[in-house]
Image (spheres, rainbow, N blue to C red):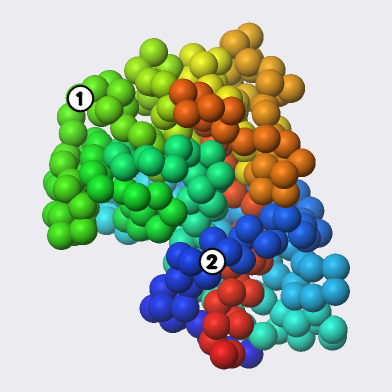
């Protein structure tokens, strides 16, 4: 069994490769039971363990274990860590143990870019990233691989982290750190939220016609990055119905408030990619993509890493 480091994942998981692989896997489908979601009460706060299995009907088998420790931010350590075990499908023999953190952040950003490729206006040039964690740079790179991004704005509670991201990408885009979130949302073509917030950060009244809103951070019912008005004003799409129904805090809390219904969701990503249901209705439509992560995405990314290593 091969041990695949984070550096190898970053090298072999190109945006073009992983987005293409995700597209194929979403359309073809895999077997993916509901993920195991375990709250862990630690001395310094609550943490979460996620177990995410998936397998192809006649191919690869995989499972990811992820630990989410939001309190790690206080220690300068990434909040998310984990590993991925990939096995071959004929006899179930392990092939590789892959660094799960790099795999997760790259497939997460790639899934949002895949959705933006289908839902955001083709002319989208201005990207607002809300959040300054490890996913923020990945979101910039992934979206820029599918849309002609020229200007990147970064908002975060930690101004120095936001400035560091802006500086890192200043040679590729015009970048700026923003403090007025309302004005930044109104000016953006794509708004990508990558936070662990439990309170709404984005208000629906700020959204302008044609905006694509990408919600990545809230993966538990108690978490949310938007108010209900965002969902009411937008055409809402999700990565999977099952994930949205069980864990998408933005959606579930808006439903609890009586401002949204689950049936209001326009489609899950596989339906849009396969052409079963339409995506963006017009250039003026506000689109919203809510993802909570799916084991399908991890399996696709792990296969892409393995086959790239084997080429």
Q: Residue at x 72, y 79 (%)?
A: 87
Q: Distance between the Cα atoms at labels 1 and 2?
A: 34 Å
Q: Residue 70: x and y, percent? A: 41, 46
Count the labels in the image. 2
The answer to whether residue 277 is seen in the rendering is: yes
Task: Name the one closer to the observer, 25 or 246.
Answer: 25
Badge 1 is on which residue? Answer: 180
Give the left or right position of residue 225, taking residue 128 as reference. right
**N-term mark: 1 or 2:** 2
Q: Residue at x 47, y 78 (%)?
A: 12
Task: Name the one closer to the observer, 73 or 279.
Answer: 279
The crowd level at tag 1 (other Cα within 10 Å; few <14, some 14-19, many 20+) is few
Q: Residue 153: x and y, percent? A: 24, 40
Q: Residue 249: x and y, percent? A: 57, 30
Dot 2 falls on a residue whose secondary structure is helix
Task: Name the mark nearer the viewer: 1 or 2.
Answer: 2
Q: Residue at x 57, y 90 (%)?
A: 311
Task: Name the one closer to the observer, 177 or 28.
Answer: 28
Quarter placement of the N terminus: bottom right
The answer to whether residue 225 is seen in the rendering is: no
Q: Which mark is residue 46?
A: none
Give the left or right position of residue 154, taking residue 194 as reference. left
Q: Which mark is residue 18?
A: 2
The crowd level at tag 2 (other Cα within 10 Å; few <14, some 14-19, many 20+) is many
Q: Are marks 1 and 2 in contact (CB under 8 Å)?
A: no
């Amino acid at each position: 069994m091969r041990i695949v480091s984070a550096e190898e994942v970053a090298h072999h998981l190109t945006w073009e490769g992983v987005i293409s692989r995700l597209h194929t896997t979403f359309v073809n489908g895999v077997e993916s039971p509901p993920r195991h979601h375990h709250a862990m009460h630690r001395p310094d706060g609550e943490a979460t363990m996620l177990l995410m299995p998936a397998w192809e009907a006649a191919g690869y088998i995989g499972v990811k274990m992820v630990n989410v420790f939001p309190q790690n931010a206080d220690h300068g350590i990434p909040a998310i860590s984990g590993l991925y075990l990939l096995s071959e499908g004929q006899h179930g023999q392990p092939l590789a143990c892959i660094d799960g953190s790099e795999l997760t952040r790259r497939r997460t950003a790639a899934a949002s870019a895949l959705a933006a490729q289908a839902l955001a206006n083709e002319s989208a040039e201005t990207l607002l990233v809300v959040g300054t964690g490890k996913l923020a740079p990945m979101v910039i790179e992934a979206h820029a691989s599918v849309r002609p991004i020229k200007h990147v704005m970064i908002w975060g509670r930690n101004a120095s982290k936001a400035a560091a991201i802006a500086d890192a990408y200043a040679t590729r885009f015009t970048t700026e750190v923003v403090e007025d979130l309302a004005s930044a949302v109104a000016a953006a073509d794509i708004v990508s939220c990558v936070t662990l917030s439990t309170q709404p950060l984005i208000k629906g009244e700020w959204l302008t016609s044609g905006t694509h809103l990408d919600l990545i951070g809230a993966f538990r019912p108690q978490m949310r990055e938007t108010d209900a008005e965002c969902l009411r004003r937008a055409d809402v799409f999700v990565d999977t119905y099952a994930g949205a129904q069980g864990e998408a805090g933005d959606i579930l809390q808006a439903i609890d408030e009586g401002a949204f219904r689950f049936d209001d969701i326009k489609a899950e990503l596989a339906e849009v990619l396969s052409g079963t249901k339409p995506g963006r209705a017009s250039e003026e439509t506000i689109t919203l993509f809510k993802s909570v992560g799916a084991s399908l995405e991890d399996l696709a990314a792990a296969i892409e890493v393995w086959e790239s290593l084997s080429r």
